Image (spheres, rainbow, N blue to C red):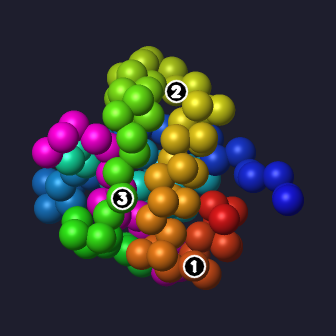
Amino acid sequence: MKAKPNFDFFRTTMPKTRKADFYLGCLEGSVFIDFNYSSKRRIYLCRISFDGFGCCNIDSNDVICLDEQSSKEFVNEIDKDELNQEKMTKLVLALIQLNKSNIWQDALKQYGFI
């Protein structure tokens, strides 16, 4: 298995027209990932945009959330002044793996998410 790239995740904001509870950018701003809370306070991926591919919205009916413990870890981590890249990478890759059938495979491969 090849090594995953250093994603270098960072918190960011988005225009009001792109609503989500949390926003991360990575790979020097080539990828932006939006996350929401479910009604059970679990974190899920709502969209991911890739330079050269566009914005991939994930239908909330098809989305798979992180489990309760991982959701708490995600929120604890994203609230810190400095993100722990190892933890954030583990959590984001877990979410992408859970939902990869709803995300463009060629974009995920090109940017090293799978």
Give the residue displayed 37% in from the left and 73% down from the top.
55
Q: Is residue 10 visible?
A: yes
Where the N terminus falls, by quadrant? bottom right
Q: State the CA–CA distance, disc 2 to disc 3.
A: 23 Å
Q: State the CA–CA distance, disc 3 to disc 1.
A: 17 Å
Q: Amino acid at mark 1?
A: Gln
Give the residue displayed 51% in from the left and 21% down from the top.
82
Kindly indicate whether the residue at mark 1 contacts the one at mark 2 (C-beta within 8 angstroms). no
Q: Sequence order check: which comes first, mark 3 or mark 1?
A: 3
Which disc is residue 11 wearing? none
Neighbours of disc 1 within 10 Å: few (<14), some (14-19), many (20+): few
Give the residues drawn in magenta, as a range.
Answer: 39-53
Kindly indicate whether the residue at mark 1 contacts the one at mark 3 (C-beta within 8 angstroms). no
Kindly indicate the quadrant of the structure image that contains residue 54.
bottom left
Which disc is residue 64 wearing? 3
Neighbours of disc 2 within 10 Å: few (<14), some (14-19), many (20+): some
Give the residue displayed 36% in from the left and 27% down from the top.
72
Which disc is residue 83 wearing? 2
Kindly indicate whether the residue at mark 3 contacts the one at mark 2 (C-beta within 8 angstroms). no
Q: Is residue 89 magenta?
A: no
